[in-house]
Amino acid sequence: MPDRLSALDASFLYLEDSTTPMHVGGVAVFRRPRTGFDYDRLVDLIEQRLSLVPRYRQKVVQVPGRLARPVWVDDPDFDVTYHVRRSALPKPGSDQQLHDLVARLMSRPLDHTRPLWEIYLVEGLARNRTAVITKTHQAMVDGIGAPEIGQVMLDVSPTPRTPVESLWMPSPEPSGLQLVADAVAEAVQRPGEVVENVRSAAMDTVATVRKVAGVFGGLASAVRTAVTPAPGSPLNVRISPQRRFAVARTRLDEFRAIRRAHGGTINDGVLAVLSGALRNWLLSRGEVVTAGTTIRAMAPMSVRDDETQVSAYLVDLPVGESNPVVRLHHVSHATRAHQESGQTVAAQTLVRFSGFAPPTLHALGARAASSFSRRLFNVVVTNVPGPQVPLYAAGAKMIEMFPVVPLAKNQALSIGVTSYDGGVYFGLNADRDAMSDVDVLAAMVEESVEELMGTVSA
């Protein structure tokens, strides 16, 4: 039988349009070793690791007449150098130039006639640094079976793992007649899927997403809590195809100190910091902020230990509250019910794969958020704890890692957060027209941490 996309995976292809490309990304910054870290080394590394992610040599093929969901097939013309690309900044390249490049790359949809991923080596970055930008379509990432490639290219030592010898020979691509025959055979065995396939053919993505939304643990309960639409916000507008990208850098020790002083969790501290930053951003825009003003966040930030599935829930961020400690207590109260449900797991469980699961878990978080009605929340915040030891790619030490979470329809901002090796890194992906001041919001994230730290006794 063909390797057919699941209803959930297919929904991300159907949801995609010119303004909402459905790829998740990451920006990893490396310190160049004395031995160098160049394009040829990256290509060799990716080629050695592709056997760990076989999906990355496959493309999506539609069934004629859309009689069934698309199938994964080996790409007989697979060329790793098409997917692994080189870019350069004018020396000495600044962080702002890197962020502008990320925004341009994330604005471009992936080529659906080829495997749905790209990696860019960015040279010329100041202070002896090199960046690697990844893009992977959400349809490709489903956890352990198909992780994100950024997860498998990293090692816990400067000495790379011994490559697995694997000779890859593509399977023959099925003909249109064979695809139709397989679809008919499956329809006979499972006639209930015929209605779904007709809906998919008509691009009835709403019906498809509603059908599969229950795949993620916690979605149904989260929907029940959202008895009212999300409040109005400048974050929810018609968006363009173009993006802006900004980052914030904080330290994990700061969030630990906040937790010791005021209780709650690290995640509560992150959401409270974002509440303060969003409050100041709204005020900087001249928006009306009252004591009861909130911004509703979709926060897919935990997994089910047995299935590596991301659980999503809704949190009303108290941006109307002026006191940072009271904001933190409001957030802790709102998230406590989810924590007591037993669905959260320890950080070490999240990184049990090859040592760096955050790229995959951010992708799963974005998938969970995409399954929700956009009327239920204002902004997506994915927060994934990463390993607190340095990681390496081809001998180069990774010093920073920023997630790039895709935007959904009418969503002007998505925020990804990853902790790694003592740092907490925020990646803000925003619509170019609606969020011309996203760099201002990023700076306010760092200021919000300082504000909370000011309440911590020495």
Image (cartoon, grey):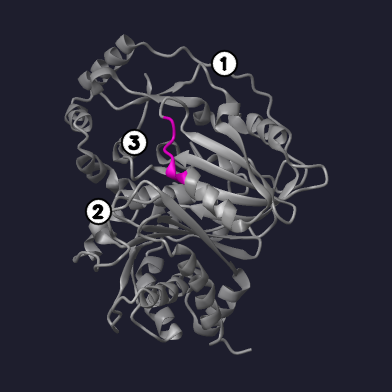
Q: Tell me whether circle 3 and circle 1 mark residues in contact (CB < 8 Å).
A: no
Position of 245 with respect to 27 (left or right) is: left
Circle 1 packing at 10 Å, graded few (<14), some (14-19), many (20+), is few
> Which residue type does callout 1 highlight?
Met
- Dot 3 corresponds to which residue? 13
Percent position (x, y) of residue 396? Answer: 73, 47
Q: Nearer the viewer, residue 233 or 417?
A: 233
- Dot 1 corresponds to which residue? 169
Q: What residue sits 33% from the left and 34% below the top?
A: 10
Q: Does residue 343 sit above or below 277 in this rendering?
A: above
Q: Measure the C-alpha gap from mark 2 to mark 3.
A: 17 Å
Percent position (x, y) of residue 330? Answer: 37, 79
Q: Quadrant of the C terminus?
A: bottom right
Q: Quadrant of the N terminus?
A: top left
Q: Measure the C-alpha gap from mark 2 to mark 1.
A: 42 Å
- Dot 2 corresponds to which residue? 373
> Which residue type does callout 3 highlight?
Leu
Percent position (x, y) of residue 346? Answer: 53, 61
In which quadrant of the rendered view does residue 173 lie? Answer: top left
Identify the mark nearer the N-term, 3 or 1. 3
Q: Nearer the viewer, residue 336 or 26?
A: 26
Query: Helix or strand or loop: what does disc 1 sit on?
Result: loop
In which quadrant of the rendered view does residue 95 lie? Answer: bottom right
Identify the mark nearer the N-term, 2 or 1. 1
Find the magenta span and give its range: 106-111
Q: Does residue 158 sit above or below 432 in this rendering?
A: above
Identify the mark nearer the N-term, 2 or 3. 3
> Which residue type does callout 2 highlight?
Ser
